[in-house]
Image (cartoon, grey):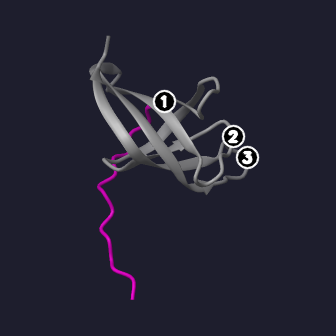
Amino acid sequence: MAEWQQRAERFLLPLPLRYRTAGTEWSEGQTHNVSGTGVLFAAKQELAIGTEIELSLDLESGGKQLPSVVIARASIVRVLPIQSAPPLLAAKFLENELLPRS
């Protein structure tokens, strides 16, 4: 029998982010929700499950930028295609760091 695992608390935060696979140009996206373990975001194109990405997430609140940026290495764990809309990608953080905005 599978062991039940509690999901990390998710925060509905529509924030801009940038993502890329190794050696490619940055693409723009937008978060749908963020947790301590990962992020669900709208992307310009689908990526295969298991694809590792780098992402940069600027934290904002009420139109004001907070003095930090999340830099992360993550792996795509789910792809949710939506009719007539950009796909949603669920990415699990493999490493992440909260940096002061420069």
Amino acid type indicated by mark 1: Leu
Find the magenta span and give its range: 1-17
Q: Quadrant of residue 2?
A: bottom left
What mark, if any, has residue 17 been given in the picture? 1
Q: Which residue is mark 2?
A: 45
Of 31 and 5, the residue lying toward us? 5
Query: Going 30% across and 57% down the picture, which residue do you hit?
Result: 8
Which secondary structure class fits the magenta region best? loop
Farthest residue, direction top: 102
**Residues under numbered marks 1 and 3 in contact, where contact means CB atoms less than 8 Å apart:** no
Which quadrant would the N terminus be assigned to in this image? bottom left
Tell which circle, 1 or 2, labels the residue nearer the N-terminal end: 1
Amino acid type indicated by mark 3: Ser
Of 39 and 30, the residue lying toward us? 39
Vertical order, 38 against 20 (above or below):
below
Farthest residue, direction right: 84
Vertical order, 36 against 64 (above or below):
below
**Distance from the alpha carbon under mark 1 to that under mark 2:** 14 Å
What mark, if any, has residue 84 been given in the picture? 3
Q: Is residue 61 left or right of residue 14?
A: left
Of 54 and 46, the residue lying toward us? 54
The local secondary structure at tag 3 comes to loop
